[in-house]
């Protein structure tokens, strides 16, 4: 059952009360409230005021459309509700005053009641204005409002506006004096034209219908929807979208429109069974809501994709165009369409090397296991824990909590990245624990904490030296401060410039871009390998770096992370050939993540004023990857019996190293540099680096090799 949007406050849609109250109403003015059913599918014929509400503009437009007008005219009552009351109470008696009610615009301008029928329809009058004190409740016909001329014989799609007029008359209705006019505008009963020429693309697991861009009246198109049938049944158990249009059948259960067939612009690509209107399943010919299988929004749309379909199955498809009011036009595709399987990158790679696979447990579902060596070490650590009661409890908690997290990682790439980042330090602790044993690990941790505390706490002698230096500085600086309070900016003050000490940067941030070609084919496949065959070359990859820095005598040292993003798209193959399948794009995406230490030779600039900072960076690299097939789902490589399919998502762990050169560019514009430092930036400039990444699961044959030797360049900031 469809639930329409409502508003909670009561309001008149549009009311134009006269500026001067007429004597016939004793100085009072009328208020008219128009309501529609809260559930039009169930209560359109109701005469219970509780079933009606003040509609939103969209709901009102959807209620007063062509399908409801036709239903009201031919099949079943389609009502709206009027509530008439006093906006301003009359000061004098209005007993005996008759109020005439008309549907239509400008009814008062026609003085001859016989001619008025060509423009308006007279509704039941209010015989005595005194009854308004009790609040008049009326139920009226949708068709009368939408096609107000009493001489009309059918619903008129040309009507774009109408009104409800409340009039008084001193001559029995010949001359009408308007009291209140409720404008119902706009009214829309004309459907937009559905494209009559479509391009059909049968893809893997989906179908795409395309058409030329609508050249005029695009504002009249709200949605395009497609309806799909297999035999006489809907393509899906549930419709993919809510129905955005109304038919006479859906509103009042009657009528079947005579649909016309569209022209297929690429018949050579579609070899299905011919379809005629007579061969359409009866429910599909009625455009039943259960057949909705795809949607595109707005008049600028040029295609609609019907996803989640089965390969090798013939589908009958109808395309529907509709406006905001739910008026529609439709055409069927005059041939069945059969989605066809293709060979995507993951399937092609597995055909040549079936050993490559995705992850299994939480560690592998996020970090890809890091190859046999890393996974073996972690399993050995697990077995070591199992020798004690506390260790067995930890292992049990890992599997209890890890299973749902692993499933989440398999389903969501974002969750996979987050969990991978979270697990890296835990995996590192586990490996050190396994290598050193728990007692030695605890001892090393305690020693590191003691050393840090010792460095952070100055000795008594050091505190005394700092106090003497502070007193000496106060003696030197105090006379200058007391002398003048100079207005000279501090960055132009020679003394200040000569004695100022720049704070050491605590963070380094970089944004870089460089060419990247994953080493998937290296040493594992005959040339050309599956990556080169499918995607050809590499692509540009953006990346960001963030490192925490610490000043030392040999320059800055620090640790941090880097994250990049790589995407490559190509047409998949027609199975068993090297031909490309038009419209069937598959995509490889890679997110390289690095946890690295860095050393930056900042002394060259800090000591000698040469604004060059060579640096070295290296550490662990982890690359998350996944492949999307043409229908947008994760690609799968399946055995002949289609059991235990391997999904195309995983990760590889390895090592990365980089050597680069940064140029501190603040010397180009000293004034800008000072402003930059005032804002918290100590240095800014450019950097370039050569990167070598060995990210192949430490040589595991089960992991994709996702490294490369390449270069990057970008901008960086120290703050």
Image (spheres, helix red, strand yellow):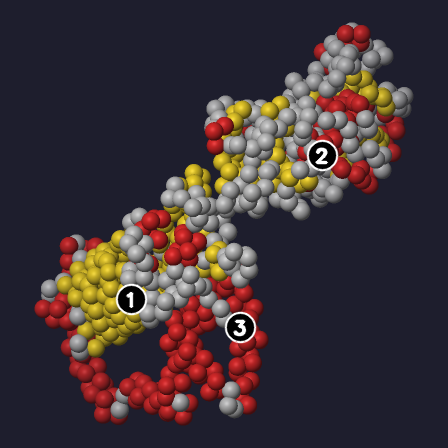
Residue 500 x, y percent position in the rendering: 18, 70
Question: Number of callouts in the render?
Answer: 3
10 Å crowding of disc 3: few (<14), some (14-19), many (20+)? some
Asked whether the viewer can see residue 397, the reply is yes
Dividing the picture into quadrants, the one containing residue 687 is bottom left
Residue 411 x, y percent position in the rendering: 52, 60
In space, the residues marked 1 and 3 are separated at their CA atoms by 28 Å
Residue marked by disc 3: 402
Q: Secondary structure at mark 1?
A: strand
10 Å crowding of disc 2: few (<14), some (14-19), many (20+)? some
Marker disc for residue 283? 2
10 Å crowding of disc 1: few (<14), some (14-19), many (20+)? many
Q: Is residue 441 above or below residue 216?
A: below
In space, the residues marked 2 and 3 are separated at their CA atoms by 47 Å
Q: Secondary structure at mark 3?
A: helix
Residue marked by disc 1: 694
């Amino acid at each position: 059952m469809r639930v329409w949007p409502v508003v909670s406050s009561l309001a008149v849609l549009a009311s134009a009360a006269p500026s001067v109250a007429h004597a016939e109403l004793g100085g009072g003015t009328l208020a008219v409230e128009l309501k529609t059913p809260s559930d039009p599918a169930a209560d359109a014929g109701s005469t219970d005021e509780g079933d009606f509400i003040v509609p939103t503009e969209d709901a009102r437009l959807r209620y007063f459309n062509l399908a409801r007008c036709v239903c009201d005219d031919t099949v079943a009552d389609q009502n709206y509700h009027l509530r008439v009351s006093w906006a301003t109470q009359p000061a004098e008696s209005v007993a005996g005053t008759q109020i005439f009610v008309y549907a239509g615009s400008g009814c008062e301008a026609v003085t001859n009641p016989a001619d008025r029928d060509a423009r308006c329809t007279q509704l039941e009058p209010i015989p005595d204005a005194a009854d308004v004190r009790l609040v008049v409740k009326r139920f009226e016909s949708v068709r009368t409002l939408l096609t107000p001329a009493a001489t009309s014989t059918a619903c008129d799609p040309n009507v774009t506006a109408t009104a409800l007029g409340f009039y008084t008359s001193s001559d029995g209705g010949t001359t009408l004096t308007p009291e209140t006019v409720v404008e119902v505008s706009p009214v829309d009963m004309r459907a937009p034209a559905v494209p009559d020429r479509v391009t059909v693309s049968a893809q893997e697991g989906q179908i795409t219908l395309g058409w030329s861009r609508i050249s005029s009246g695009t504002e009249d198109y709200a949605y395009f929807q497609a309806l799909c049938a297999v035999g006489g049944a809907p393509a899906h158990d549930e419709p993919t979208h809510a129905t955005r249009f109304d038919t006479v059948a859906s509103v009042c259960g009657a009528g079947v429109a005579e649909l016309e067939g569209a022209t297929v612009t690429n018949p050579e690509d579609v070899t299905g069974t011919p379809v005629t209107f007579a061969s359409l399943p009866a429910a599909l010919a009625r455009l039943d809501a259960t057949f909705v299988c795809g949607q595109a929004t707005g008049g600028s749309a040029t295609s609609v994709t019907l996803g989640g379909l089965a390969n090798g199955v013939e589908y009958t498809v109808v395309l529907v165009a509709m406006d905001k009011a739910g008026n529609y036009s439709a055409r069927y595709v005059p041939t069945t369409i059969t989605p066809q399987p293709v060979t995507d990158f993951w399937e092609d790679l597995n055909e040549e090397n079936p050993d490559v696979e995705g992850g299994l447990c939480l560690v592998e579902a996020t970090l890809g296991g890091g190859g046999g060596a890393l996974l073996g070490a972690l399993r050995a650590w697990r077995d070591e824990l199992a020798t004690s009661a506390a260790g067995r409890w930890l292992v049990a908690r890992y599997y209890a909590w890890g299973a749902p997290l692993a499933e989440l990682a398999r389903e969501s790439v974002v969750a996979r990245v987050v969990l991978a980042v979270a697990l890296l330090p835990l995996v590192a602790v586990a490996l050190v624990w396994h290598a050193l044993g728990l007692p030695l690990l605890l001892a090393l941790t305690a020693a590191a904490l003691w050393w840090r505390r010792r460095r952070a706490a100055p000795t008594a002698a050091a505190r005394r030296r700092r106090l003497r230096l502070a007193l000496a500085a106060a003696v030197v600086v105090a006379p200058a401060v007391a002398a003048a309070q100079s207005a000279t900016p501090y960055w132009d003050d020679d003394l200040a410039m000569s004695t100022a000490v720049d704070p050491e940067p605590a963070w380094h941030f970089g944004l870089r871009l460089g060419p990247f070609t994953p080493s998937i084919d290296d040493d594992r496949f005959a040339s050309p390998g599956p990556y080169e065959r499918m995607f050809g070359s590499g692509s540009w990859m953006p990346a960001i770096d963030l490192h925490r820095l610490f000043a030392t005598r040999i320059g800055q040292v620090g640790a941090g992370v880097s994250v990049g993003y790589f995407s490559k798209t190509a047409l998949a193959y027609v199975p068993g050939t090297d031909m490309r399948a038009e419209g069937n794009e598959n995509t490889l995406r890679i997110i390289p993540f690095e946890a690295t230490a860095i050393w930056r030779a900042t002394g060259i600039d800090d000591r000698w004023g040469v604004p060059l900072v060579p640096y070295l960076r290296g550490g662990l690299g982890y690359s998350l990857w996944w492949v999307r097939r043409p229908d947008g789902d994760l690609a799968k490589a399946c055995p002949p019996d289609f059991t235990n399919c391997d999904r195309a998502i995983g990760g590889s762990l390895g090592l990365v190293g980089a050597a680069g050169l940064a140029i501190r560019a603040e010397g180009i514009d000293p004034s800008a540099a000072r402003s930059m430092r005032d804002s918290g930036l100590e240095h800014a400039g450019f950097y370039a680096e050569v990167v070598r990444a060995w990210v192949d699961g430490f040589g595991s044959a089960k992991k994709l090799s996702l490294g490369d030797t390449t270069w990057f360049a970008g901008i960086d900031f120290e703050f």
